[in-house]
Amino acid sequence: MENNRSSVKNALLHGDLYTRLSAIIMGIGLIGHKQIVKGIMVLLCQIAFIFFMINTGIGSLQMMPSLGTRAQEKVWNEAKQIYEYTTGDNSQQILLAGVVTCFVIAAIVVLWIIQLRHSYSLQKQLKEKGHVPTFKEDVKNLFNKNLHITLMTLPCLGILVFNIVPLVYMISMAFTTYSKEDEHLMLFDWDGFHQFSRVLNMNGNIGRQFFQVLKWTIIWAIFATFLNYILGMILAMVINRKDTKGKAFWRFCFVLSIAVPQFVTLMIMNIMLQPSGAINVLLQNLGLISAPLPFWQNALWAKITVIVINIWIGIPYTMLQITGILQNIPAELYEAAKMDGANSITIFFKITLPYMLFVTTPYLISSFVGNINNFGVIYLLSGGGPTYVGDTAGQTDLLVTWLYKLTVDQQYYNLGAVIGIMTFVILTIVTLITYRNSGSYKNEEAFM
């Protein structure tokens, strides 16, 4: 940023007439320094920006502080003998238009800096070399030394339009009254940090639900991650032994579950574990139970059930990861350890396990984060139930499934935005702290 400020300052102080004029009329510096096509394109961008601001942008910015004031009204039409509704302000559209306008302003500021610096650079090139690249040469360079610009422009624009802008819009909602509470779905206002205080207040209804769901989310993520990892590692080591016959067959049996779409498997398991499902009917017919087991009716049973089913569908992935690592551990390490008299347990804890943990730490972190956001397993199996810890959250709800219910089912959009922000903050802290303290980060060359 300091370099950018210095370049702009130098351009304004030491630039020629064209460069200084480009601070007011964008593109003039490029046109004056013999890059006419690029200069015209930049000038058209400025004209389009001015047109946008006059027609839409200024109005959007003016409406941002209030997010609208005119509510929809019901008026009796005497001639038609019916009630008609007058069009009021739509705060959602006003907020979105304001956010988009802010991004457009930021984009034009960046373009202004780039074209000003480029004009000053062309000025120096003309003075030193007497020549600047033509438009044809610039286009050719986009497929040569500037190929990275060509390849990255569309992906970056896609990330900006489909990720960053909606994310900022969602974050903005957290500071408003946008929810079905007090009928603030069409016309709402800024609310400061009130929704954050509701979520973090353990004595309030929403706060109690948040901390209950957060506690279960962490417990779920720990069990879902490390049980899958440990059992998958054991399975991979057993299959990978020299004495194991038919290694390919056993791997095929476990990997076969990956071939079936996960949502199909989860929906079938949900049906099979219902009170009248196949599992309960079979156990009752065999005389092993007298009444259906409450897989989805009891909170503890539901929590254990979703963990066990997640192990069943998750172990094959871990087994494949560990199998590849086991096959790449140098055999010389094992031979040297055996020559030193180490037994199987010592070899595992001194060679195999450290090597696997070093290589798979990023996988473990991504798996932990993925399990915190594991919407499909919870929603398709238990639906977040069976009982509620409050008005909105169920006993097996994760933060992500609770967020879905708050927004889609119950229309608490501001609270949903707060939960989304809190989830992001928690995941960021856990990921950064864990990875920065892992051997994979601190000692990258250890197993090279």
Image: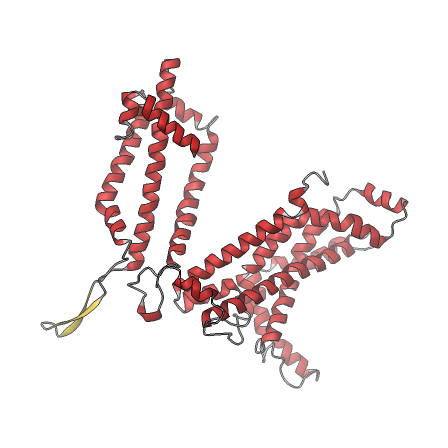
Q: How many marks?
A: 0
- For this orientation, the residue located farthest to the left is 79
Q: Is residue 313 visible?
A: no
Q: Residue furthest bottom?
A: 290
Residue 38 location in percent, x, y? Answer: 33, 27
Q: Which image quarter is the C terminus in?
A: top right
As displayed, is residue 225 above or below residue 273?
Answer: above
Against 44, residue 343 (above or below) is: below
**Image side of residue 115 versus residue 348, left or right:** left
**Foreground of the two, 208 or 159:** 208
Q: How far across and how far down the image is residue 119, in percent? A: 34, 24
116 in relation to 190, above or below: above
- Residue 409 image offset from top left, x and y in percent: 42, 68
Q: Examine the rendering and report whether any part of residue 65 can be seen.
A: yes
Q: Which of the two residues, 414 or 409, is positioned nearer the viewer here? A: 414
Q: Using residue 287 as the reference point, say whether residue 176 is left or right of it.
A: left
Write down the quadrant of residue 111 in the picture: top left
The residue located at (15%, 73%) in the rendering is 82
The N terminus, quarter of image? top left
Above-or-below relation of 37 to 306: above
The residue at 30%/20% (across/down) is: 16
Left-right relation of 358 to 78: right
Residue 95 location, quadrant: bottom left
- The structure residue drawn at horizontal position 60% and vertical position 79%, both measured from the top left corner, is 294
